[in-house]
Each structure stands twice: as C-alpha cells, then as structure tokens.
Amino acid sequence: MAPPPSSLYTLSFFLAALTTLLVCASLRLLAILPRTPFRPQPIRRKPIATRVLIVLGSGGHTHEMFYLLRELDTSKYTHRTYVVSSGDAFSAQRAVEFEGELEVREKARLRRKEELEEEEDEKLEGQNGKIATQNEERQACTGPDHYNVATVPRARHIYQSILTTPVSSLWTLWKSFPPLLAAPPLLPDQSPQTPYEAAAQDLPDLILTNGPATGVIIVLGSLILRFFNLRGANSRGKCKTVYVESFARVKTLSLSGKLLLRVVDRFVVQWEALEGKGGRAEFWGVLV
Amino acid sequence: MAASWTLTEGSPMKVCFVTTGATAPFTALIESLLEPSSLDALREGGYTHLLIQFGTAKDVFETRAQAARNYLQQQGNETFAIGGMDFDPNGLREQFKLVQQSKGLVISHAGSGSILATLRYQIPLVVVPNDQLLDNHQEELAIAMERSNYLLRGDVKNLAPAIQKSADFRIKMAQFPPITSGKHRETKSFAAIMDETMGFLD
C-alpha cells in the first residue's frame, strides 16, 4: 500500500532532498571547475570568429590590462567586450583609445603590405608575367563594429558600509549577465549576418581579468552559466577564464587573486615568488 | 612653463625629471631632492635641469625650490634650472621624451603605474618607496625590480648615492618589458597565453 502524499511533507523528506541537491551541486561544481594545473589542449578547427570579454577596473588595473593586450591579434579575437564599472569614465575612454590604436596599427600594416606586394608584382612581371597573391590570411577585425563597452554597477562604492556590500554585489552580478550573454547587435533586433556578428552575439570564448572587484563578480557569473550549462556555456567550452595577478604583487596575492585562485581556468602571476600558489599559479615572466 | 623646455643643438642639456604620484603627495621626496646634497650630486652628474611634478604639493615645492635656487646662487651656479609642473592628466609622454633625448634620469615614487610608464622609454629610473605609507607593496616591488636590474632604489633620506649610481646603471640596465627574462626558463607573452587557453596552437 502506497503511503499517502501528505507523508512527503516531513522533515526527513526535506533533509533527504536537500542532501541530494547538495551532493549533486558539489559534483557539478567539481565537474566544471578547472583541472589542476592548466594543460593546453589544441582544438581541431579554429573558429573564424571569437568574442573576448575584458574586465577593466580602476586606473592601475586598466593600465596594466592594456599593457597585457598590447599584442592583441584582432584576426583571432574578432570581438572585444570591455566591461567597466559605472562612473569609471577613464577606463571606458582608454578602451576606445586602445581600439583606435588597433585600427591605426592595422591600417599601417595593410599599407606596408600593399607596398611590398606592388614591389613583388613588378619583379614577378619582369620575370614571367605571373602574379601570385594568395590571400589565405585571416581578416583583422578592427573598428567600432568589432568592440563594445558595457557598463555594470559598481560592486562597492567608496565609503559604502560593509553590510550593504553583499546586496550591491548581487545587483552587479545580476547586471553582469547581459554583457556575458551577448554583445548588442549592430542594428537593433537584427539577427547576425556574418560569423563575426554571430560570435559577438554569443557567449564570450575568453574572459580576462586582472584584479578589480567587478572581475570577481563577472567570473562568478560565468561560473553560474557553466554550472547550468546555459546556452551551452559548458558543453561548447565557452567562458574560459584567465586571471593575471597585478605586476605590483610580488610576494602575496591580492584579495581578488585569493578569491579566484581555484576558480579560473588559468591563474597567471608575474613574480617568481608567487609561482605555484594554490598548486596552480603559473609564472611566465613579467607580462605587462 | 617647464614642459616647454626644448632640446637645442649645441647647448648641452641633461634633464632629471621627478614624478611624485597623483593620489597621495610625496612631499618628502620633493624636499629631499631640493636638499644641497642632492643638488650637488645632480650637478656633478652633469645635469642642467631639474623638473619636478609636484602634484598637489605646490606650496612645498615653491618654498623649497626658492631655497635651492638661493643655495645654487651662493655656490656661483646660475645655469642649473629648477622647474615645477602640476599633475598632467594627459600623461607624461613629453617629459619622458625630453629625458630620453637628453640622456637624463627619472626619479619616481614607487607606484607600479609610474614604473611601467617610465621603463617603456628605456631611461634610467630611480624609485623611492614612500616609507610613510603603511601596508603597501611599493617596497617589495622596488626590491624585486632592482634585483632584476630594471631600476635603482633610492632612499628618501639621502638621494645622492642613487643619483651617483645612475650614471653607470644606464649601461647595464635590463630591457623592459623583458624579451627573455629568465636565464633558465621559458618565457611567454600574454598573447601566447591567450592563444594557448583558447587551444590556438600552431
């Protein structure tokens, strides 16, 4: 004889359900959290277009981030989303400047290449009249269509009480999902027309942060996406995270570093004394 | 005024540029630089110009600079110029270029931003950690950077030894950012780290 349904509403039933849920959640967390230490795994086919999400912070963090990104290859990282805290006009401005520099650099490179090709063409024509210019090179992606600046509310204002910080952090977390999920389309309500636009309106492939509090919250947001495999965040291998500890931290990790040490896919430090922290901090020399 | 100092052909010019940080004024550094001992060390090193970015400590700079000028006059030296400038939100590109061209020297507080900005110009740098700041990592960073031969460390109580050392340091200073920073280890650029993480291995 089956027990009546009311017998399900007992304390022991809830405890059992809660335990099952906890066990499942822990197993899921173990499954999505990174292996220790990082081992590069080559992919079979390089995607044509990717999106990288870059978290900018207060002055120092932003400066260092752009030093890190100085060799950014826009033909591989075709869309950049810069996340800044509300009120941080400096970082937003630096992002626009940096993209401007990328554009100028790319134009100069193209001009040089054209000149070289012209010279070569002349030579070749002199020899046998054959022009061989195969263009298998990936296209560089610079200009306003290939980046966006997203703003999230500040996690903690200066002089804000420590008691209300969790509340404002939750608000930041909530507001960090839109930039995590997609960059805004070029035209409102337009479906992507090119692979580049499709990548831009998809989850980021890579998330870069170097220490601002917003970065910790964005990484937490990406973990939630991976935990529930929202939009295939986990199964498609999206939202890979890289944390770079500040160049100014020589012997001890920053608070953001300590929080993210076991969570990010790669944890990179810039001084030898920090190598191997948490069994996974990598050191490859000064990077900035 | 001071920013418009220009390098002219024929007239020897050697600039020492001092930056004290935008947030907390490092008045002890300004005071120490305008002491007779520092001024003597600079003149012995062949310096002709001292340019100080005083930030918010304008009053301190003006009174000390006047005293320093009086001292120089007593010594019969009229050519050594002392100038000051406010915090410049547009960065210090012009000042660094001037130092670079005149084969001069930068003396800076030990903030990581100033260090990174200065070293890009391949100019000798003396950093002076602010001993008034509690719980910060300036000292650690300065020691680590000096050990790697990127810069020299100066003592705010007596800057003359660091200024004297900087003449030889110009020759042996290490390139920054490092191309291969370790003697026995593989180094990578951040671009390579990004590619690896994505699985873009060629």
Image (cartoon, coloured by chain):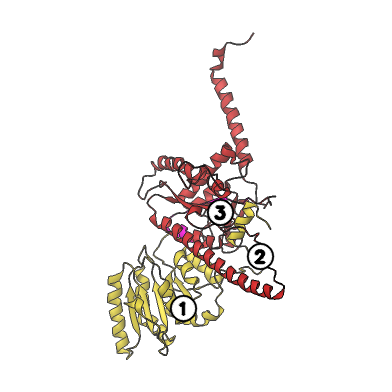
Chain colours: A red, B yellow
In magenta stretch: residue A56? yes
Read off the magenta span: A47-63
What residue is at 43 percent from the left and 56 percent from the top?
A: A91
Residue B72 position in % (x across, y down): 32, 86
Dot 3 corresponds to which residue? A78
The correct choice, above or below, for B185 with respect to A50 in the image is: below
The residue beneath circle 2 is A133
Q: Secondary structure at mark 3?
A: loop
Measure the C-alpha gap from mark 2 to mark 1: 42 Å
Q: Are marks 2 and 1 in contact (CB under 8 Å)?
A: no
The front one of A115 and B91 is: A115
Amino acid at circle 1: Gln
Q: Nearer the viewer, residue B138 or A220?
A: A220
Residue A32 vs B67, above or below: the answer is above
Q: Could one spot residue B142 in this view of the protein?
A: yes
Residue highlighted by disc 1? B100
